[in-house]
Amino acid sequence: MSSDVGVTLSNGCRITHGRGANIKKPFSDIDLTMHELSPGNQKGFRGQLGFIEFTPELRLPRHVHMDASKERLLDERILVLHGVGVVEIAGKVWATAPGTLVDITGGIPHTWSACPAGVKLSDGSVSEGKFTMVFEYEEPTSFFPTRSTETVTNVAQYQPFDGDNFDEIRFPKLTAQQVAEQAEIVFDKQQQRLSLP
């Protein structure tokens, strides 16, 4: 579903890339183009801000985020700086190109890894097997692992992971072929399929 900025998924998460952003040229005499990936946020994010460098070997466990008192589900924002990431959002796999902002609504189970080398994006570029993300949380939080891919709308619905081995809920090890077959990508304001070179 398209929104004013980016593509809003049915679960409330949003993926914004390229021409799907607000594009501004604020100066007539300076060649500056601004890609506004978010029209602002009403939440006033105050949580941790940082970055993570990924390879396909780094596969996060599926999780949600809550406040420290475990009373409220929290939103998260991820900006892909360079490389190609893959994210599972509520059980669906998406590839994320450089310059993509992913807004993950509180209560949506998600997990990340780097796209394996060899996946061709809509602009003709090919993934190299690594990516760097910047993350920001609505409030201070940590990871709350879950086996479920189902959206939770309140903390009481959260199903904690009860296993001994996070491998059971990590982003799956996918080949370039599997990513091309399973994932979609938001490029500009269009949901698209991936391919191999």
Image (tube, grey):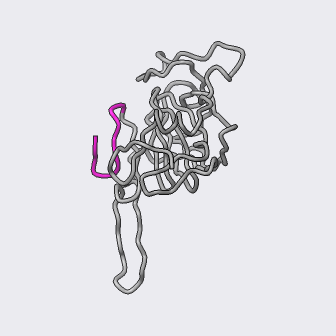
- Residue projecting furthest to the front: 197
Q: Position of residue 61 (x, y in %)?
A: 62, 28
Q: Position of residue 158 (x, y in %)?
A: 51, 18
* Nearer-the-camera pick, 194 or 86: 194
Q: Residue at x 60, y 28 (%)?
A: 172
Above or below residue 97? Residue 163 is: above
Q: Image quadrant of residue 85? A: top right
Above or below residue 73? Residue 13 is: below
Q: Residue at x 57, y 56 (%)?
A: 82
First to last magenta residue range: 1-11
Q: Residue at x 41, y 72 (%)?
A: 33
- Residue projecting furthest to the bottom: 29
Q: Is the N terminus in the top left, top right, bottom left or bottom right quadrant?
A: top left
Q: Position of residue 118 (x, y in %)?
A: 57, 47
Q: Image quadrant of residue 13? A: top left
- Residue projecting furthest to the right: 164
- Residue projecting furthest to the top: 162
Q: Residue at x 50, y 33 (%)?
A: 88
Above or below residue 161? Residue 73 is: below
* Nearer-the-camera pick, 183 or 111: 183
| Magenta-colored stretch includes residue 75 | no
**Secondary structure that dominates the magenta span:** loop
Q: Position of residue 7 (x, y in %)?
A: 34, 45
How many numbered marks have been drawn onto this rendered protein structure? 0
* Nearer-the-camera pick, 28 or 75: 28
